Amino acid sequence: MIGIAYQYGISLEELQAANPGVDPHFMGVGLQLIIPIGGEIPEVLPTPTPVPAEWSQPTCYRTGDGGAWCLMLVRNTTQAGLENLSAWIGLFTGQGENLTGQVANAPLNLLRPGEAMPLMAYFAPPLPQGLEARGEPLTALAVAADDIRYLDLPVQADQAVISEDGGQATVSGEVVIPEGIPTPSQLWVLAVAYDATGKAVGARKWESAGEGSFEITVFSLGERIARVEVLIEARP
């Protein structure tokens, strides 16, 4: 619900007050909300429907300061690129009481078909033990086939060098800029680390103003790193 409130430029409290019978954490597609626009006559508008994608439930990893990093993996199962990915992640007690929540955004704006990327949110301490994390997709928009805002560049990544304890991995490589393609004005490379069960345990982004060679060290928030995947976003 906080993502919807942000979209219409109102506070979460205003939206909740206009919809007292709606549970903000469990809203299904097609639900209608009263949107109090400008404090005037409320309008009834449908909730935004994210483009279908494969969303996992978040996994949280405790940090040494008593907080937690929560990662919610989204996989693009469509035939088009996806952008503006966001989700709500909430922490609940064993009795179902919501203690806190926040909007998690994607480290890259673009997720190509077949790729996966974790949305990450940090919850500050103190946090009690025994918490359960739940997530709800908020936004995911399809990128048109003729969209010219992104460059389709191949990336050549060397095999990731994983430390003996599996706590970190370093991957290096190069973003190939074919002849006739302009040097990108903005270039991001994202390294996503996974454990042996396929859960995302860490991510780190590298940024450049056009230079294509990169080296990224990503650290695990949880179990040993088993593999690393590399994603790219480039703007002309």
Image (cartoon, grey):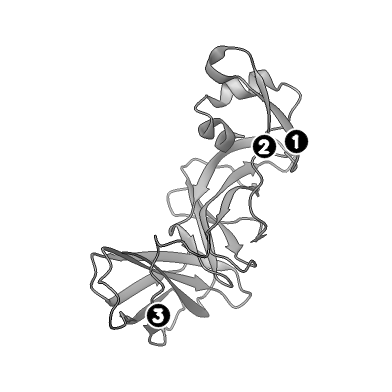
- From the viewer's side, name the closer residue of 177 and 202: 177
Classify mark 2: helix, strand or loop.
Answer: loop
Mark seen at residue 47: 2
x 56%, y 38%: residue: 3
Say which amino acid is labelled 3.
Pro
> The disc labelled 2 sits on which kind of residue?
Thr
Residue 67 visible? The answer is no
Q: Amino acid at mark 1?
A: Leu
Asked whether disc 2 touches disc 3, contact meaning CB atoms under 8 Å apart, the reply is no
Q: Is residue 135 above or below residue 185?
A: above
Name the residue: 61% across, 47% down: 129
Residue 150: percent from the left, percent from the top? 40, 64
- Among numbered discs 1 and 3, the one appearing first in the sequence: 1
Please give the residue where the numbered disc 1 appears in the rendered image.
31
Question: Crowdedness of circle 1 by 10 Å Cα count: few (<14), some, many (20+)?
Answer: few
Closest to the observer: 76 or 57? 76
> Dot 3: within a 10 Å radius of its alpha carbon, few (fewer than 14), some, or many (20 or more) residues?
few
Q: Position of residue 195 (x, y in %)?
A: 56, 74
Which quadrant does the C terminus fall into? bottom left
Task: Determine whether 29 is above or below 235 in the image.
Answer: above
Does residue 77 sit above or below 4 in this rendering?
Answer: below
The tag earlier along the polypeptide, 2 or 3, is 2
| Residue at 62% over, 34% down | 1
**Residue situated in front as seen by the camera: 48 or 225:** 48
Residue at 28%, 83% in the rendered image:
179
Q: Are marks 2 and 1 in contact (CB under 8 Å)?
A: yes
Image disc number at residue 154: 3
Q: Secondary structure at mark 1?
A: loop
